[in-house]
Image (cartoon, grey):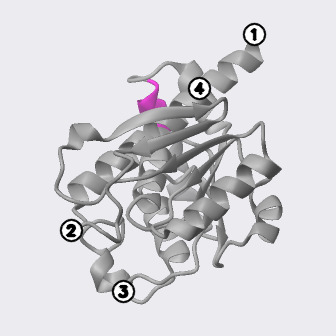
Amino acid sequence: MIVNNESQIAFGYELRKAQEEKESKEVVDALAGSTVAICGLGGLGSNIAMMLSRAGVGRLILTDFDTVNITNLHRQFYKTSQLDMKKAWALSDNLAEIAPLTRVELHDEKISPDRIKDLLTDADVICEAFDNAEQKAMLVGTVLEVFPDTDLVAASGMAGTGDANDIITRQISEHFYLCGDFHTDVGEADSLLPSRVMVCAAHQAHKIIQLLIHKKAAANN
């Protein structure tokens, strides 16, 4: 885990004060007091983490076992200097630069059903960001069973060259939201463009932010 120095922390508070000029203090405080778990730190997860930390989410639980490779760089939030680094650690470094007040909890492992309860129990919202269909199904199924009252935001269909506006956010059940075009699978499409991947990541990040704000507002009423 990255430990920010005093100057970074001080700058972090300057950032938060500046953020209050663009957003209400209620929104800033709601996000700062929230925890989001992101499972998978590739094209979706790394960019979701970037957006949530910029928005001021106070704590992120980041899980991925993979390393940064050259095929990741066109669509994931990593740098050329981070090739062969573990994604969890590389992403933590990048987030520390742009959002010093966001605390990160890192898990360098391939998540399994028997670990989900231990890893994700503190999360206000859980985000599925895998690129493997079996892992997606495993996480969604397990979370819906183990944490039936926790909001889950997942993705399905962001590959190919289709219209960006085909990517939408749909509420599947009371606490389950799905973002994507719902049919363009990574394994079947002929391309995986950064623009389309990031549109889907933005849908997920924005839904998470909405949920956190609404959750805090409901708790205060």
**Label 1 crowding class (10 Å Cα cut-off): few <14, some 14-19, many 20+?**
few
Q: How far apart are marks 1 and 3 (CA)?
A: 47 Å
Region in magenta: 15-20
- Is residue 203 at least partly visible in the picture? yes
Label 4: which residue?
213
Amino acid type at circle 3 is Leu
Judge the density around disc 3: few (<14), some (14-19), many (≥20) Cα neighbours within 10 Å: some
Give the distance between the C-alpha atoms of the residues marked 2 and 1, in whole angstroms: 47 Å
Disc 2 on helix, strand or loop? loop
Residue bearing the label numbered 3: 83
Say whether disc 4 or disc 1 marks the residue closer to the N-terminus.
Answer: 4
Residue at the (57%, 42%) spot, across then down: 57
Q: Which residue is pictured at 42% across the width and 35% down the height? A: 169
Q: Foreground: 22 or 36?
A: 36
Query: What is the x, y in percent for residue 191?
Result: 21, 68
Q: Would you name the residue on which mark 1 appears?
A: 221
Q: Earlier in the sequence, mark 2 or mark 1?
A: 2
Residue 168 vs residue 91, the one in the foreground: 168
Q: Which residue is drawn at 81% across and 51% down?
A: 146
Label 4 – label 3 distance at C-alpha: 36 Å
| Amino acid type indicated by mark 4 | Ile
- Kindly indicate the quadrant of the structure image that contains residue 63: bottom right
Which-is-in-front pick, marks 2 and 3? Answer: 2
Q: Is mark 3 on a helix, strand or loop?
A: loop
Asked if labels 1 and 2 touch by Cβ distance under 8 angstroms, the answer is no
Q: How far apart are marks 4 and 1 (CA)?
A: 13 Å
In the rendered image, which quarter contains the N terminus?
A: bottom right
Which residue carries the number 2 mark?
Answer: 191
Label 2 – label 3 distance at C-alpha: 22 Å
The vertical placement of 51 against 79, above or below, is above
Q: Which residue lies furthest to the bottom in this view?
A: 84
- Asked whether 67 falls inside the magenta stretch, the response is no
